[in-house]
Image (cartoon, helix red, strand yellow):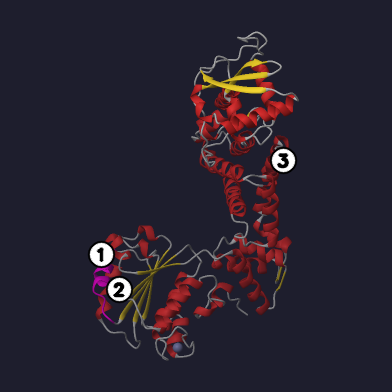
Amino acid sequence: MSYQVLARKWRPRNFDALVGQEHVVRALTNALSQERLHHAYLFTGTRGVGKTTVARILAKALNCETGITASPCGECSACQEIDGGRFVDLLEIDAASRTKVEDTRELLENVQYAPTRARYKVYLIDEVHMLSSHSFNALLKTLEEPPPHVKFLLATTDPQKLPVTVLSRCLQFNLRLIPADAIGGHLTTILAAENIEAEQPAVQRIARAARGSLRDALSLLDQAIAFGDGRVTAEDVTQMLGDVPREHAYALLDALADGDAGQLLAQAARLAESVSDFGALLDDLCATLQRLAVQLAVPERVAEDADEQQRLAALGERLTPEDVQLYYQIALLGRRDLPLAPDPLSGFEMVLLRMHAFRPASAGAPSAAASGGTAPAQRGSKPPAAARRASTPEASGTTAGAPGPGAWHALLATLHLRGLPYELAANCELLVNDAADITLRLNEAHANLLSDTARERLEKALREHLQRELRLSIEVGITEAETPAERTARLSDERYLKARESIANDPVVRALQDGLGAEVDDDSVRPLDA
Ligand SMILES: [Zn+2]
């Protein structure tokens, strides 16, 4: 008994059977049922997502003997001959193998003739971007004035290579990569129909390995069935495909999240025993980081299997979105530079160590935290770092018995004032503090803070705190000592400048600037001891 490969046996014969291209099916179905037909269709998308399959179903829909329909009957001779690949009015050309201008010319010479039997003569040109420029010109001439009985169905993996003149004359449909869970579901249906025993993890593994291509998934499934002698087990599939690449990526990210360089290098050494392609490993790392970034940004978006979801969620609790972006960038650049490394393993190790070294310091770092170029800037206004009077340690009283500025600062701190009374007090220096009187001088630049209410509330607070009757007078003038407000601003400036300096001198930040072109957003610098 001859074995028919699954991709052929299970090729969808109508739109309902297509997997994962609902947007294309809906548009075509509507167009067909309303007979709004275009003369040229272009199907784009990566290999194995169903471009020529859609085109063949469309050819049937146009030529089914029951009439133009979104649901070709599958039983009339037109439908059956198209399914069997022997319909005279469906001309299939693989441009990848027929690129000479004579071939296209020969093909297009017959365009003017009416179809032999069918409603439409359908030209299905696969990998149309491979046509020579001469062939394109021949095709374009026909597209400019298409005979009414002709339909062009073009397919390509690389629409960028098509001349705009051709693109503009086609109705374009972009077929998507098929999600792994849709592929998995389809494989499960096929396995049940074929009465083949299969373990779900094995099926999921194949679905993911196919990377969005149903054809690749079916051909892997064929291999797995042959490999397992009619059964599909997780163990066989692992043997067939090698270790799960995701597992490597997760192990590495776990070590990174732990901040454990030793574990990281041990993991790399373990990988070196079974993996030879470190570039592919970095690809897997990038792919996992991308899914992790999505998980962190839009948790409900990731629709992979439950296991994957769980692992991503666990990692997401230990890594920040900034970590993930940084690792991705380092992995991507490391992938590019891998051929320049003395040897692949050492290049790979350096990428991992760079990730480990560059991870931004988390909260709790000694003096300052940096925001790299990618982090959103938290812009805040900084008081101008104007030179301010330094406080002298504290015995500058101009009036006998008057305490120095330090005493006023300390007293103010214990008053627990808020709002205007606080602002008022903070911009004053203390001139007199004796049994009955307290006299303050308000910095004239802040004279607007002085009001009866504010003065009375400050007086009340002082009475309560000092537990004595006293009279508070405030004069406005040029202050001589540093006021509490000036002191706060000076200390804040000093802390800010210190934080900026410590960031500028930080070796990790410098390496990020040199290696990745990062820029420090000075406005986002926040002293942590503030
Ligand atoms: Zn039919």
Q: Is residue 17 above or below residue 427?
A: below
> Measuring 51% from the left and 28% from the top, which residue is drawn there?
383
Report helix, strand or loop for mark 2. helix
Residue under numbered circle 1: 137
Q: Which mark is nearer the camera, 3 or 2?
A: 3
Pick whichever, 277 or 519, lies toward us: 519
Q: Tell me the magenta residue range.
A: 135-148
**Residue 388: horizontal and vertical position, in percent?**
53, 18
Judging depth in this view, the residue of 219 and 328 nearest the camera is 328
Q: Residue 118, image x and y in percent?
A: 35, 87
Q: In the figure, 501 relative to 247: above or below?
A: above
Please state which amino acid type lies under the numbered disc 3: Asp
Q: In the depicted view, which residue is nearer to us: 56 or 5?
A: 56
Residue 67: x %, y % from top left: 40, 89
> Crowding near pointer 3: few (<14 within 10 Å), some, many (20+)?
some
* Residue 243 shows up from this direction: no
* Nearest the eye: 521 or 352: 521
Query: At x 70% / y 54%, what residue is drawn?
Result: 311
Q: Give the quadrant of the C terminus.
A: top right
> Which residue, given by chain and number where applicable, does mark 2 sit on?
107
Residue located beneath label 3 in the image = 258
| Residue that protrudes farthest toward the right in the picture | 467
